[in-house]
Every structure is written in structure tokens, then in C-alpha cells.
Image: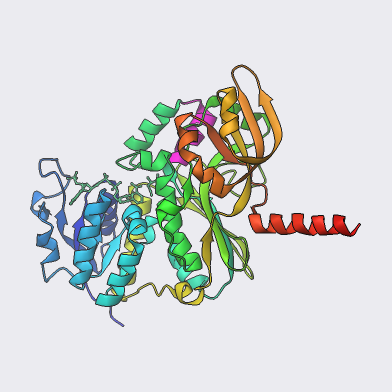
Amino acid sequence: MTPKKLKIGLFGFGCVGQGLYDILNKNENFPAEVIRICIKHPEKPRPIDLSYFTTQAQEILENPEINLVVELIDNADEAFLIVSEALKRQKPVVTANKKMLAEHLPELLELQKKHQTPLLYEASACGSIPIIRTLEEYYDNEHLYAIRGIFNGSTNYILTKIAQENVSYEVALRKAQELGFAESNPVLDVGGFDPKYKLCILVLHAFGLVVSPDKIFNYGIEQFSLQDLQYAKEKGLKIKLINHAERISKNEVAVFLMPQLIDSNHPLFHVENETNGVIVEAAFSQKQIFIGKGAGGHPTGSAVLSDISASLYNYRYEYKKSHWNKHLQFTEKVLLEIYLRYNEENELTHIPFEHISELYHSENYKYAIGIISLEKLHQVKSYLQEKGIFIAYTGKKIQSTEEKTQKSTEKQKQLEMV
Ligand SMILES: NC(=O)C1=CN([C@@H]2O[C@H](COP(=O)(O)OP(=O)(O)OC[C@H]3O[C@@H](n4cnc5c(N)ncnc54)[C@H](OP(=O)(O)O)[C@@H]3O)[C@@H](O)[C@H]2O)C=CC1
Ligand SMILES: N[C@@H](CC=O)C(=O)O
């Protein structure tokens, strides 16, 4: 089949937009060219001819010559309007906007179906790692147990710089912004929202589940302190922001993200800077690990290029798992072991631990390690943030609350029999 020639209308010419433009320019024989670029600030200097640029979205959306829209802007609400309009006009779309995708998955699935027009978004999750199409195609018939990993380049970069180079949190964050890794609103990164949006997207492709980002517990690295780093280092551990989507029973998937203490045997221990890592666990292929750049103009641009290339052949996601896995449900009914560093003695009484196994308190440093239900932890999230409390999952096996109740009932029964 001879591929068609793509005439691209590009929205956004920032870190990723320019990265993509550069890659396309270096790929002379690739049958696609950017013919119009919509940006926000016409007064900004541009590295290419100004005749490409417009601030009028309609100039792209209404242009019959344009047969692919590539959306790379930094505003999720405006992106949703652009993407919806393009799909309604049956123009295929490629986007990297994970916030827009995660917040509008049901509408975007519907729009694609209704207008028989594909929306591709490989670059929206973990930059250059080809994880979405891998889940969609390679794992289409596999029974997945879990998907975990480092899904945010900026926070991994910040944690690496602090741990390895003694750089302050503020300086490391500024550098991540300068390098183009951080979102325009960096709270999305450090607060763990950006990786949560990516988790929503991967949960859809791994398990066929649409979970609204509001439902998922995310705790970022804003409360991380040198005391936590010291604690980790003394024990030979590292702190990483890790996402989890794990089948904990036949019908339930537990989904959350927070900092995690990992040891040198953990597959993500050596994943540093803006590099991301995804671990996929499945029944037959077992454990597979994907590692690659999670942020930056060229790595992300390469994932966008791959989607552009796929649209040459009219590729579209089939969302097969959402047809097969209708029985699956999102849950927070699990028990986790966490490290919790607090500041004032009375704060601990507000934390609904099921059980505390270790408690340390000196005047300047206090922590507890114990078991807590994810559901209850979610309920006290604002309190933890307000008090500057840092938490990290210890990585000890996640247990479903039902499993625990069943076990104690069984134990009770055994005791009664004795
Ligand atoms: N940076 C990265 O490493 C990665 C980013 N992404 C995602 O890619 C997208 C782009 O990110 P990034 O390139 O870093 O962002 P930048 O802030 O570098 O660039 C944003 C671009 O969007 C333009 N823009 C903003 N609003 C509008 C609008 N309403 N209409 C037209 N253009 C608009 C800006 O215009 P102007 O130039 O005039 O200001 C700018 O060119 C985001 O969704 C981000 O989450 C995904 C993976 C990695
Ligand atoms: N801000 C994001 C950019 C890529 O998705 C990150 O740091 O990972």
C-alpha cells in the first residue's frame, strides 16, 4: 500500500512542537509536512519563517488541505476544544496532552466512534517509551496483572539531582523547567498529577478501565525533605515517585501513586534523571521492563512522529480490553505499608493507621511505619499536605482489605474450633 502524503496542521510550537518540527525536517523522505502552525503569542520570536504561524485555530480546522491535526499545546481545556472540533470534522488527531485525555476519556472515546476518526496519543504517557501501542497490540490477548513505574521525568530528575548532587529542591525544579521537562504549571509534576493522568491512560489500555483522575490517590514530592533522603540513604534505599495499577482480585484493580522506597534489587533503582521506566506484569510473558526518556522535545517528538507515521496507515486504537474486561473495577480497598514523616507529636493521632510497626521520634525528626488502608489515606490527603507530612510506600505486598478480613475471620474460626 502506498502511503498518502500528510499535510499537518500543528497546534503549539514549544518544547515538543519544535522538537517534532526538527525531527520531521531531518526525515526528508517522510511523507508528511507541517503546513500551518497555530500558537498563542504572536509577538514571540520564532526560529522558522513567520508565514507558517497563525493565532486562529479555524485556519487549521477549516483548511480542507490539512488531513492531520497535531495538538501540542500546554492548556488542557483549550486542547479539548481543538481536538473535539477536529474529530467532528473527521480530521485525525495526534496529541501529547495527557491532562486533556485523562479528564475527557469517555467523551473522546465517543467522539472517535461517532465520527469514525482516530485519535492517537503515544507521546502522552512516558515520553519516548512506546507503551500505549505495546499494551494495545503486543499485550492485546495477555492477562495483565500489574503496570507500575516512573511516569514523570521532572520529579525523577529533581529527586536524582537532590540525592546525587546535593542540589536544592528549588534549583532542581528550576533546571527541570529550563530543560523543558516540567509542565507550564509545575505543580502538575511535583504534586503527582501529571503521572496520574498518564496512569489513567495506561489503565485504560492495560485493563480497559476508564477511571476519572479525581478518584485516584496521588501524593507528590512537595513534602519531601533531606531527613527522608537521609533515612533512605542510611538503609541503602532510594525514593522514587512510583505509579501502581495492580489487579488485587479477579475483579478489582488498585490504582494509586506516591513516593516509594526502593532497594537496589528493584528494577527502577537505576532509572535516574528524566528517564522513565514501566514494569508490566502479565500471566504468560511475566515481567517486562521498558526504560526510556520520559520528557524533552526530541524524545517526546519521536513518539509524536511514530503516531504520525501510524496515521499514514489509518491506524487506530481498538480499546479491545474495554470490551473484554467489563467485570473489572477500580478499588481503593487495599492495605499498604507506608513510611510517614511528621512534624508535631499530635499529628499522628489524625492518621488512621491500622497498625504501627515502627515509631521514631526525636525533637527534629519523627516517623512512623505502619499499615494503612488506601481509602482512609485518601481521606486524610489534605491534612497530610497542610501539615507538610511526607509519605512513602515501602513496597511491601499490597493486600486487599477483604483478603485481610477473610484471613482474620478464618483465624477467628480456627480459634473458636480450638
Ligand atoms: N515537555 C515535555 O517533555 C512533554 C510535554 N508533553 C505535553 O505536550 C504538550 C506541550 O508541551 P510543551 O511543548 O512542553 O509546552 P510549551 O509550554 O513548551 O509550549 C506550549 C505551546 O502551546 C502554545 N499554545 C498555548 N495555548 C495555545 C492555544 N490556545 N492555541 C495555540 N497554541 C497555544 C504556546 O504558544 P506560544 O509559543 O505562542 O506561547 C506554545 O507554543 C503538553 O500537553 C505537555 O503536557 C508530553 C510529553 C512530554
Ligand atoms: N512534565 C512531564 C513531561 C512529559 O510528559 C514530565 O516531567 O514527565
The residue most toward the right is 418
Whole-percent x, y for residue 80 in the image: 25, 58
Horizontal placement of 305 versus 166: left or right? left
View extreme (front): residue? 416
Assign the magenta stretch its main secondary structure: helix
Q: Nearer the viewer, residue 42 or 231?
A: 231
Which residue is at 32% across, 35% downward? 178
Furthest residue in direction bottom, as rendered: 1
Which percent across, then down, holds residue 333?
58, 55
Give, as a single range, the part of the protein colored magenta. Answer: 155-167
Question: On the rendered image, what quadrant is the C terminus found in?
Answer: bottom right
Quarter occupied by residue 254:
bottom right
Q: Position of residue 50 (x, y in %)?
A: 9, 49
Q: Is residue 341 above or below residue 47?
A: above
Counting labels gives: 0
- State left or right for residue 177 relative to residue 403: left
Residue at 70%, 56% (x, y): give it: 405
Residue at figure coordinates x 57%, y 64% from the top left: 252
Can residue 126 be seen by looking at this rendering? Answer: no
Q: Tell me: residue 142, above or below residue 49.
A: below
Q: Taking 310 as reference, is 357 above or below it?
A: above
Q: Residue at x 42, y 31 (%)?
A: 172
Percent position (x, y) of residue 255?
Answer: 52, 55
Query: Is residue 162 in the magenta section?
Result: yes
Q: Is residue 413 magenta?
A: no
Where, quadrant-wise, is the N terminus in this rendering? bottom left
| Colouring mode (rainbow / by chain / secondary structure / one colour) | rainbow
Residue 270 sits in quarter? top right
Residue 381 in sight from this viewpoint: yes
